[in-house]
Image (spheres, rainbow, N blue to C red):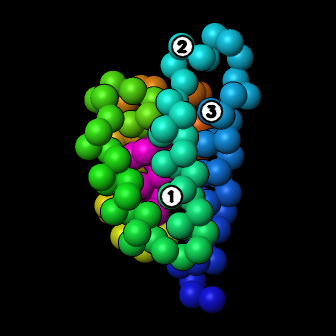
Amino acid sequence: MSMSIITAKPFLWLLLASITAFGGLYSVDALADSITPRTYKKLIDAQELLAEENVDDAIISLKSWLEELDEDSLDKALTLQTLGYAEMSKERFQVAIGYLRASLDTGKLPESVKYNVGYMVAQL
């Protein structure tokens, strides 16, 4: 197993946890700023590709999806976050930092996710 896959696994679990949290586990107050079912499916599909080590396919899919999203949305924030994790698994750390910072800059991530993403950026 390559080093990039070993280091990527914790990020994939964090990613899956953050995506799953938006599948309906947050309070009713959070529903006003929740992701669409279509984005949820796209992010789960990307996570599955990443888990299967099809990182390039995941990145292509996420970049294509990103173009369809509203600028000021949680959908975009989580798609950027996922792109950041995908780029980390390819060891393209500067590109990953760009996506993760862009995710933070949307201002749409909940506090717990924001702190985790900020921590990842600091570690890189």
Neighbours of disc 2 within 10 Å: few (<14), some (14-19), many (20+): few
Q: Amino acid at mark 1?
A: Ala
Residue 93 showing in the rendered view? no
Q: Is residue 50 above or below residue 43?
A: below
Residue 49 falls left or right of residue 76: right
Q: Which residue is mark 1?
A: 46
Residue 34 falls left or right of residue 60: right
Q: Position of residue 90 (x, y in %)?
A: 43, 74
Q: Is residue 102 above or below residue 12?
A: above
Magenta-colored segment: predominant secondary structure: helix
**Residue lying at the far bottom of the rendered structure:** 1
Front residue (pair 66, 86): 66
Residue 50 falls left or right of residue 97: right
> What residue range appears in magenta?
78-88
Q: Earlier in the sequence, mark 3 or mark 2?
A: 3
**Residue lying at the far top of the rendered structure:** 29
Q: Which residue is mark 3?
A: 22
Image mark for residue 113: none
Q: Position of residue 46 (x, y in %)?
A: 50, 58
Q: Earlier in the sequence, mark 2 or mark 1?
A: 2
Marks 3 and 2, how far apart in space? 12 Å
Residue 75 showing in the rendered view? yes
Q: Which residue is mark 2?
A: 32
